[in-house]
């Protein structure tokens, strides 16, 4: 089992990737402070495939990055 | 409590907790006052223990580019911005991965509350208000 990482370590090691953290330590704002990275990939589906395989009771999944500067998003 | 976001660029991404029969999943949704309903991707819902394609009520949603098929289901709870909504109905539908979020936090989450978005400080506050007329 990998060791828990701080959010600073996670953000610096996996830029512009989708990240799955198991048993995240979150603050009152729900942002992840630390946890065990169980999967990371540029491909969101790959990260969720791993998550659904593990079936964690507590998890966090997010994209560690911003859309490109020139990207326009209209939802 | 104030929540922080990057006021200079990108979406306003909000951490939410999706609670379900298997567990709790923290994912990011875009705060979207242009959406009447809260929408969450199928995989985050499955991670919490739901099967949207089996239990959701089929429905049609209107997007900026047309209409799409989706399904609606109630989840045990949704927590965001310091507030928890129980038995909260959400639309199950995938946004493109390029959006960098797993759905949108829509107006239905904010009704009856006071939502303040400060684009100078990059802060959001959601406080209890009164009943919606």
Image: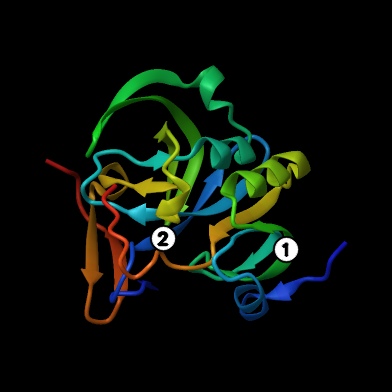
**Split into 4 quadrants, where in the image is the C terminus of chain B?**
top left
Between A21 and B10, the one lying in front of the other is B10
Total number of numbered labels? 2
Task: Tell me the element at label 2.
Answer: strand
Left or right for B130, reference A67:
left
Mark sitting on residue B48? none
Question: Quarter-wise, where is residue B82 in the image?
Answer: bottom left
Neighbor class of circle 1 (other Cα within 10 Å; few <14, some 14-19, many 20+) is many
Name above or below for residue B76 compared with residue B57.
below
Residue to which mark 2 is pinned:
B14
Q: Which residue lies furthest to the left in this view?
A: B133
- As measured in the structure, the alpha-carbon distance from the residue carrying label 2 to the one carrying label 1 is 20 Å
Q: Where is residue B76 in the image (x, y as percent from the top left)?
A: 52, 37
Q: Which residue is drawn at 60% across and 35% down?
A: B46
Residue to which mark 1 is pinned:
A37
Q: Position of residue B58 (x, y in %)?
A: 40, 18
Name above or below for residue B123 compared with residue B17.
below
Between B4 and A70, the one lying in front of the other is A70
Name above or below for residue B46 compared with residue A40.
above
Q: Residue at x 21, y 47 (%)?
A: B34
- CB under 8 Å between callouts 2 and 1? no
């Amino acid at each position: 089992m990998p060791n828990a990482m701080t959010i600073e370590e996670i953000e610096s090691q996996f830029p512009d990737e989708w990240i799955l953290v198991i048993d995240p330590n979150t603050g009152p704002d729900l942002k992840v402070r630390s946890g065990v990275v169980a999967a990371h990939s540029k491909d969101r589906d790959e990260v969720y495939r791993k998550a659904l395989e593990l079936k964690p009771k507590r998890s966090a999944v997010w994209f560690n990055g911003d859309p490109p500067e020139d990207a326009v998003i209209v939802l | 409590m104030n929540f922080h976001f990057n006021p200079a660029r990108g979406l306003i991404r909000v951490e939410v907790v999706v609670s379900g029969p298997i567990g709790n999943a923290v994912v990011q949704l875009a705060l979207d006052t242009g959406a009447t309903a809260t929408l969450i991707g199928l995989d985050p819902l499955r991670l919490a223990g739901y099967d949207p394609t089996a239990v959701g009520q089929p429905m049609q949603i209107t997007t900026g580019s047309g209409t799409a098929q989706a399904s609606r289901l109630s989840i045990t709870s949704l927590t965001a911005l310091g507030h928890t909504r129980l038995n909260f109905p959400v639309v199950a539908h995938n946004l493109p991965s390029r959006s960098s979020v797993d759905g949108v936090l829509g107006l239905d989450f904010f009704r009856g509350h006071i939502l303040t978005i400060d684009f100078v400080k990059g802060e959001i506050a959601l406080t209890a208000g009164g009943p919606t007329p």
